Every structure is written in C-alpha cells, then in structure tokens.
Image: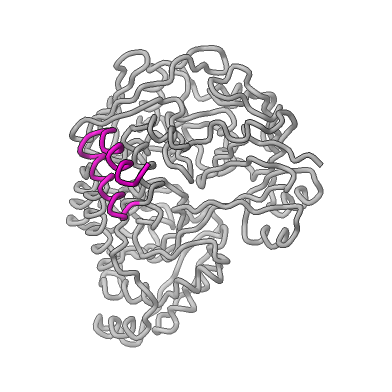
Amino acid sequence: MTKRNEIDSLRNLSGDIWNVAVDEYAAGYLKRRDLLKYAALIGLTGFAASQGLGFRGVARAAAPGGTVRVGLGQPTKAIDPVTLTDPASIGVVSQVGEYLILDDPKDGLQPKLALSWEADETAKRWTFKLRPGVKFHDGRTVTAKDVVASFERLVDPNSGSSALSAYKGILSKGGAKIVDDETVAFDLDQSNSNFPFYVSSDVYNAVILPADYAGDFEKNFNGTGPFKLESFRPKQGASFVRNPDYWGDKALPDRVEIKFFDDEQAQVVALQAGQLDVIPSTTRLELAIEGNPNFKLLSVQASSHDAVHLRTDQAPFTDKRVRRALALTLDREAIVKGLLKGRAIAGNDTPFAPIFPSSDPSVPQRKQDIAEAKRLLAEAGVPNGFEVTLTTERAYDIPDYAVLIQNFAKKAGIDIKLNVLPQDAYYGSATFGSSPWLDSNLGITDFGHRGTPDIFLNATLKSTGAWNAAHFKNPDYDALLVDYGKARDLQAQRVAAGKIQTLLLDETPEIISYFSQYSRIASSKVEGVRFTAISHLLLDRVSFVQA
C-alpha cells in the first residue's frame, strides 16, 4: 500500500478528531507508533490491535511450565490495592489484579477488562464497554457494578484511598455510573481528553475489585489476573499459581514465587547465587552485574523524574528570577551521562516529558548558563548569592543528585546546605503543615512514571494540588490546564502544552532536569519479563531458556 493510500484508509476510521492526528502523521509531525497510541487513547482499540500492538500472543511458541522467582523489597504496610503506594506491593498485586486498561510502556493503552471506550463531544463523559465473561478468582463474573464500586471506593474521601490526589478535580464520588451490566459511564468534574489514562494501570490503585470488597485483600488476593494466590506470608513473601479460568491466554509459568528483602544487596546476592530470576534495579546493583553474561538489564524509557520544588511563597524563591537562576546552574547533560549513566533524557523544568506526544518540542531547551544565572541574581538584589537548605529523602540516587545540585549552585554563589532525611521522615503525614516534603523551602521528590502529564500537572502545580510542594498559585496556569484538558486532538493539545511549558519555564516553580528510564535485572535464563515504569511486574509470558 502506498503512503497516500494508507492515509486515505486511515481517514475512514473515525471522525474529525482522529483525522487531525492523521494529518500530522501525513505531514511527518507524528510517528506511526504515536499515531497508533493515539488511536488507542480515543478508543480505536480494534485498529491499534490490528497493527500489532499489545502483549497478547507474545512468546506463545515458548514452552510452558516452571517457576519464576522474584525478589522485591518489603511492602510498607498491609497489601491493599486501594491504599498501596510502594513498589513491592504493586509488584505483588500485578500478579492477580487487573485494570480496565493497561498502559504498555512501548505500545500505549491496551484493552484489558475494558474492550473499548469513547468520549462525548465535550470529553466530559466517557463510556467504557467491558469485556464479557471475565471472572474473579472466586468464580463470580465481573459486571459494571464491580467496576463502579471500585472507582467509587477510590474517590471516596473516607476510604483511605491513595488515588484521591490523582482524581481530585477530575472524578468525584457519584461520577461513575452503571449503564448496563457490561457498560460503565464516567461523568467528569471537568473535560479531560486523557481520561482513559486515569482508569488504566497509570493509577496503580485502580485495580478492579468485587463490589463487596471489604479491605481484606491479603486473605485471598481475589482479582481477575493470570495467577491465583497459593500462599502469602507477611514480611516473607508470596506464591501464585496459573489461573486456569483466566479470560485471556493462560500464563506460561506454572508458578510465581516472590520473596521480600529488607536489603537490596541481599537481592543481588540471591540473584548471583541462582536463587532468583528477577529483581528491581538500582545503580549500585547494576554495577554488581555489569559485564556478566549471566544477567541482563531490562529498561524502558519513562516519565519518572526527581522534581526539585522551590517554595514560591518563601524567600528567597518568591522572586522568579532567583528560581530561574538556580535552574540555570544545572548541567543537565552531565547529570544524565554521569549520575544516570546515560539511561535518561534531559528535562526542561516542566512535567512534559519528550515521550508524551502532546509535548511541544519547539519550546527551547534550558541549558546551563552561569553568566545568566549571576545576572539574574544581581537583578533580583542578591548579587553575592544566598544560603538555603535543600531537604530531601534518602532514596535511590537522590542524595547524589542533591550533591550535584549543591556543587552546580556554588558556581553562581548559591550556598546550599543539605538535609537528607529517611524516606518516611521526609514524607511525614504527606499533608501540608506536617510534611518536610510539602513544607520545605527547597526539596527533591521522586515521582514515578505516568503515561500522560495530567497527574503531574494537576497534583504538583495546580493551585489546589495535593502535591504542590512549591506552593505555586498562578491563575493563568490553572486556566491553561482547563484548556489543555478540553483539547480534543493532538494538535490542540500541543498548542495548549506549549503555552504551559513556556509559562513554567518563565515561573520555574520546580526544576526537572531529567526523565529516567525504569529498569529490572533478570537472569539470562528467562525470557519474556515485562514491566511498567510504575513497578507492575508482568510475568505471565515468561519462559525459560533451555540449556
């Protein structure tokens, strides 16, 4: 088929919104993979699947059988999809729980318990058709009642849901409605063209649970996934067996064994000893297996980032010139190459990662400029710089990143003192007034991957955002968020995004100097290990290399 004929056939698939994206593809502004991702976003799931997207069918030629052995950290509390926040719990739940949609890091939104979805003309009402005949592990059939109850639970302020910050201003209690047994509608608080991401694995709490779920998940791990609970031992681990009644392709492995570790070094020792097949990855652990053909590093590009917030309501950062000056001291390429070993891409001080199709690539990239930083400081009345304390968490590479920021800032005369806290102390109660994260003048916070920038834009920078550590309150920004949410096609989204990106570069309430890759370490004896950049661990397609 010629490119012209292909374009003509694409135009016949949907209406004007889709055709704008086709125009961008025809003009070379949109890659084919991004076009297919957009097809899934607006509900053209059949077309996306016909183009080879999705996980189903992967490794079907591989021999079934065997046990996959996984090392994870310790869950921080009882495992409950509604309240979980830690990577270990997400890894465990992803063996048994499923979402309406899976956000595949390579191929975008993939149908799971939802077969298709569409929005009305306002993008304020979204309707989802459910996959028929799906059963929970206890034998009951999944219906719209279960789906509605799952989301009503997540948006209920009294449920203890960890997803409240994600849904704030987007979906409120009463917004999810039963249309019929296999159809659910969501009436949103405001228009949002990216809403399918909000019911996908991007909101890791949005696992579909029975309507009568009472918070006792650890008793039976009752979900719809490809594995069923065999045994669970708090603080020790869990094991799962193939679900013979799974709605899709049956899992290849017979079993999955998960062991919890208090120390990450113990995980790599167990991997090296042949006791584990898959473990999480950190820079320190990667060094331990570097160059060893018995192990491999698996990575996906993500929107994960470590945001540096600057309190816009406290000196010295009440002046945006001071905020911009600090941002200009950072050598982003050096950070990517040195701290992150090249496994990241440079950020531009906004949540719009380059992997998001809606990001406006024409916005100039901020680069290190010490002379300009000094000029701005002088103009702001602090020509000799100032002293400030940077408060952050002792986790991942963040302490090393803090030292780099400290050293870069010195070049402009800014003297940064470091206050590195244990992770639980840094987050405190995660509420304003009792959290070093949200209350510190200058801080670094890690944010996991999302498939769309919406959650970052709303939760971290909106005036009423639950994670707004910068205390940034800008009516113009809030209005632009509404425009971005209403944009119905990629071209309109990119125009709105460009305005947001430009405003944030000018105001600089936070510094985002890189977007990281997300990695796992695996034995070379296993194939088919899949994962999302939010810690989901998908093991149903794993097979073992025959010696």
Quarter of the image with the C terminus in it: top right
Outermost residue to the front: 2
Q: Position of residue 429 (x, y in %)?
A: 45, 47
Q: Is residue 6 magenta?
A: yes
Residue 120: image quadrant is top left
Give the percent coordinates (x, y) of residue 523: 72, 47
Say which residue appears at 66% left-offset and 50% top-offset.
Answer: 521
Residue 243 is situated, as x and y percent measured from the top left of the image, at 62, 21
Q: Return the x and y of residue 69 as percentages of the image width and height.
A: 72, 38
The colour scheme used to paint the residues is one colour
**On the rendered structure, is 429 left or right of 240?**
left
- The residue sitting at 28% across, 85% down in the picture is 378
283 or 38, nearer to the observer: 38
Give the vertical position of 480 relative to 114 (above or below). Answer: below
Image side of residue 96 versus residue 304, left or right: right
Q: Residue at x 54, y 66 (%)?
A: 342
Q: Quadrant of the N terminus?
A: top left
Location of residue 209 with respect to 81 vertically, above or below:
above
Count of picture labels: 0
- Front residue of 12/232: it is 12
Picture quadrant of residue 337: bottom right
Q: Bounds of the magenta span?
A: 1-30
Task: Please say if 139 is above or below 165.
Answer: above
- Please, what is the dominant secondary structure of the magenta stretch? helix
Q: Is residue 265 left or right of residue 395?
A: right
Residue 315 in magenta stretch: no
Instruction: Give the residue at x 44% y 33%.
Output: 49
